[in-house]
Image (cartoon, helix red, strand yellow):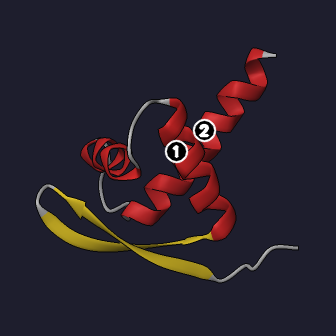
Amino acid sequence: MTEARPVKHSLTLKGHRTSVSLEDPFWRAFRQIAAENGQTITELANEIDSQRIGTCGLATAIRLYVLNWYQRRANQD
């Protein structure tokens, strides 16, 4: 089993430094998705951040993005 504790990483969004805490499996998946899209994780985080609705936090938005990405991929098979 992988470590369940969130790991904090700093990102720059819209010119401002922020930190995001995600569990290692989410960081790995997030990096993989960004790489497959030809993006850095900062670019992908900016994209996700710009699409957030309401009071959804960035870490939650990233987790949901990762989940939806894998669900879409699974449904393509």
On screen, 73 above or below 22? above
On screen, 2 above or below 64? below
Q: In this view, does 61 lie to the left or right of 63?
A: left
The quarter of the displayed image where residue 75 is located: top right
**How far separated are the C-alphas under marks 2 and 1?**
5 Å
Residue visible at 54% across and 50% down? 31
Give the residue at the far right of this rendering: 1
Q: In this view, does 56 lie to the left or right of 28?
A: left
Q: Where is residue 43 in the image (x, y as percent from the top left)?
A: 31, 44
The quadrant of the image that shows the C terminus is: top right
The quadrant of the image that shows the N terminus is: bottom right
Question: 10 Å neighbourhood of mark 2: few (<14), some, or many (≥20)?
Answer: few
Residue visible at 32% across and 48% down? 52
The amino acid sitting under disc 2 is: Asn
Give the residue at the far top of this rendering: 76
Task: Decide which of 65, 30 is in the foreground and name it.
Answer: 30
Give the residue at the far bottom of this rendering: 5
Question: 10 Å neighbourhood of mark 1: few (<14), some, or many (≥20)?
Answer: some
On screen, 16 above or below 49? below
Task: Decide which of 53, 45 is in the foreground and name it.
Answer: 45
Mark 2 touches mark 1? (CB < 8 Å): yes
**SS for tag 1?**
helix
The amino acid sitting under disc 1 is: Tyr
- The image's mark for residue 65 is 1
Q: Where is residue 56 in the image (x, y as percent from the top left)?
A: 38, 60
- The image's mark for residue 28 is none
Task: Decide which of 64, 24 is in the foreground and name it.
Answer: 24
Q: Where is residue 27 in the image (x, y as percent from the top left)?
A: 57, 61
On screen, 35 above or below 3? above
Q: Mark 2 points at which residue?
A: 68
The quarter of the displayed image where residue 50 is located: top left
